[in-house]
Image: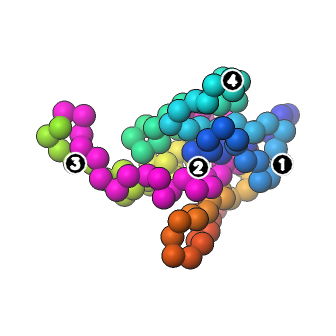
Amino acid sequence: MVTRHLDLGCGPTPRNPYGRDEAHGIDIAVPAGLDGRFFRRANLAVEPIPHPDSSLDSVSAFDFFEHVPRLLATPDGRGTRFPFVELDRCVDDETRLRRHGEAPAASVQRMANQVEFRRPQ
């Protein structure tokens, strides 16, 4: 069975910290020339991760969380959303996506100190 890793907010180069057979990426824009089988576009501040349940072996998010806006207007302009607070949805998505295996890996580089997050199994 082919193993798959997903890197959230990866820009043009998805990381593959667990050495899976395939490295997939998601970002707010798809860089030109990347293979659509391995790279998808999504605004994860407001959209779910566009992969089916149990389709991945691991997920990472390096230098992603600090780019999620703290505040957004709703599409109709009459309300307010708090995407950073809503990131629980993103964490639930990554749990839904993983077949088994490693805990998700994440790091936040632009804080006072580097912080690593690992959600308990």
Residue for badge 2: 95
| Comes first in the chain, label 3 or label 1 | 1
Q: Are marks 2 and 4 in contact (CB under 8 Å)?
A: no
Q: Nearer the viewer, mark 3 or mark 4?
A: 4
Which residue is the site of mark 3?
A: 80
Residue position for label 4:
33
Residue type of the residue flagged with mark 1: Gly
Q: Are marks 3 and 4 in contact (CB under 8 Å)?
A: no
Q: Is residue 23 above or below residue 87?
A: above
Which residue type carries mark 2?
Thr
- Visible residue check, residue 77: yes
Residue drawn at the location 22% of the way across and 48% of the way down: 80
Instruction: Measure the C-alpha gap from mark 4 to mark 1.
Output: 23 Å
How packed is label 4: few (under 14 Cα within 10 Å), some, or many (20 or more)?
few
Marks 2 and 4: which is nearer the front?
Answer: 4
Residue corresponding to mark 1 = 19
